Amino acid sequence: MTASTGRRRFGTFLGVYVPSVLTILGLVMYLRFGWVVGNVGLAYTFAIVLLASSITCITALSASAIATNMRIGAGGEYFMVAHSLGLEMGGAIGIPLFLCRTLSITFYCYGLAESVLGFDGQPIDPLQEKLLAAGLIIVITAVSGASAGLALKLQLPILAIVGLSIVALVIGVGQGDLHAPEWTATYRTAPGGFWYVFAVFFPAVTGFAAGIGMSGDLQDPRRSIPRGTLAAVATGTAVYLLVPVLLATTGRIEVQDLADPARFVWVDIAFLGAWLILPGVWGAILSSAFGSALGGPRVLQALARDGLAPRFLSRLTRSGQPTVATLVSGAIALVALSLGELNAVARFVSILFLTLYVAINLSCAIEGFTGDPSWRPTIRLPPLVSLLGAAATVAIMFLISPVACVAAICLELLLYIGFRRRALRRRWGDARAGFWAALARFSLIKLSRHRSDPRNWRPLILLFSGDPQRRAGLVRMANWFTQNRGLVTACQMILGDLATERGEIERREREMDEALRHEGLVAFTRVAVVPDFEQGVMGVTQGSGLSGLRANSIMSGWPEKRERLLAMLRMLRAASNAGRSTLITRLQDPVVPLQTPRIDVWWRGRHNNGDLMLLLAYLLLMNEEWKSARIAVRTIVDDESQRRGMEQSLATLIDETRIPAEPEVIVRAAGGGLVETMHERSAGSDLVFLGLRDPEPDGEQEYADSLLAMMDGLPTAVLVRSGGEFAGRLI
């Protein structure tokens, strides 16, 4: 009992072991074990039991590892998956899990009603059958909603009855003659072969998660879940190794009769027959129904608490019971009863259950592979073993029903996509960040061991964007250049003292992230506090990135003030010496091109800028907005004698670079100025690339004047200064 709510919490035996072992020792044990032995013989039955139990044991160990590494709250398996693979994946698994457990109440109650009314072999009235099933659903829902303790305590006499039925089978076998077992497979009534029989048997060992579903009601989930779950799996495996020996060696029934799927062989063999066996069957069904009625609403409660279902479903009574969720679950079970044709969805429900086991194994495997320092479970399982368990479960899903398997995967994929689009806010960390961090670490180490070469050049742009809300066009241009082939880091600089601007850094980074998301742009964000603009740019540039992913290009907008332009020109030489290219962009409306855009690349063959300009123009074509663009490579010569040689040079360049472009050699008119010619030819262009040079020492003023005169008559333009190993090596 907790002091605040009076809520009762349960220990390992009652809270985990009892519901788990009773779900494992269920209908398949009574109704299909004889059929298994009669078709595949004792040796293959052992193989089926051991293989199925091994997969179950791996999944149970994966769940135990997760349970011992975190504080498990309400929701059991959903909680584990959501906190390991993310809220979206948790929802994609949790909602089907809730529906499966709710529909299982219907299946169990319908089956129990059919068994009770038809035990004497007389015809069953369908209406009477449905009314009894409905009554059972209402009673089970009422008991489970009122008190989990009462529902769990009712399972104790059921456990005794199930145990008594197994003892009755042992006594019955001992009272009759014994014979040597049939070891070889005959497949008398199972023409589908070994794997068909395996698929029919496998659901018998998948009930261990019933106890995990009670995680929110346990005194110590970290201790109880692994102990209770593994004990239940061990008990189930021991019983499933004993029962086939009894069935295979008894002389009370012929071997061929074991294979009859319509014959209830336990009644024929056990001591007192139906008097002890039928109560065991009914108890197993009733216990499974209670397990579903307890576990399903708690999954729904957890989903609602995390914003994946209506909030009112998360309400608890003063005693801590999810009564609202339980009533909703019971109502769905009643509606499902009225629909009929339950067998049509039973296989689909089984497959959905198995997707949960896949998710648990994947969660444990990913947690193990990431190597996060937070992964410190007291029960450790090699990640490859968990991965093997996931793969084996997927294989079994296809064995049971390929169509149902594909349908289940599609359903959960649609749910995942839906939750992703909702941009859910999670309150916890999960293994996804660790996975990507581990992958990034591996990739960076591999990348650092490869010598940098122009063949592998990609635009890694450090963009001094300022406020992205005001300069979204600049960030969009950088995104066009990188288009899934490079990276953009948008940097905003604050002139000041780091000691006083710490809070401002966090605020501006949040604002930058929100602005980029609003515009649909992809970029890393960084806010740097610097004492001086020039020193700040070079300091941030040199400290940006990691080995193999250091920024190779500096990009900025066109400065509004002449002093800032002069500062940028002074930095050109330093940037080149540091192996960084420089891109200065002046944007004109419209930023997004219309109809058939034209890109002009002004080629002068100096400073190796042309190679980078041509490549950037080509990268623009990879974007939807620019895919229809025409690239014109233009150059100016002084007289006709130079035209032919330059045309051949440009044609060879375009051919060797394999970039779709049109060369154009312009002979400057007598007395015509270079700037006037460029203005005239590029007046109708959407984007112009121009080369930059390092200004002469103390020549920044003169160079700034010439650039200002050139830019005034042009559309959107990008000034390029190529640096680093890429220079002059486009081919």
Image (tube, rainbow, N blue to C red):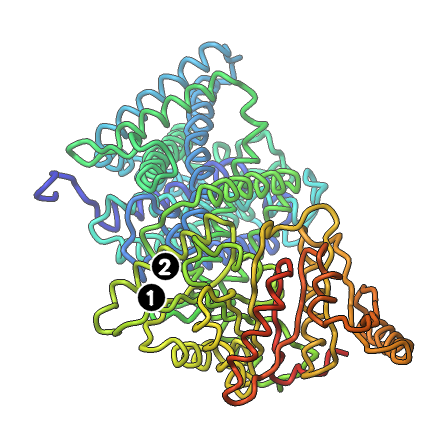
Residue 220 seen anywhere in this rendered image of the structure: yes
2 and 1 marks in contact (CB < 8 Å): yes
Residue 175 seen anywhere in this rendered image of the structure: no
Which residue is found at the position 80% from the left and 72% from the top? 668
Which residue is found at the position 47% from the left and 9% from the top? 127
Q: Amino acid at mark 2?
A: Ile
Q: CA distance from mark 2 to mark 1?
A: 7 Å
**Labelled disc at residue 377:** 1
Residue 381 pos. (x, y %): 42, 67
Q: Residues within 10 Å of mark 1 (few under 14, many from 20)?
A: some
Q: Amino acid at mark 1?
A: Pro
Q: Secondary structure at mark 2?
A: helix
Residue 391 relative to residue 112: left or right: right
Nearest to N terminus: mark 2 or mark 1: 2
Which residue is found at the position 57% from the left and 60% from the top? 479
Residue 388 pos. (x, y %): 55, 62
Residue occupied by mark 2 = 66
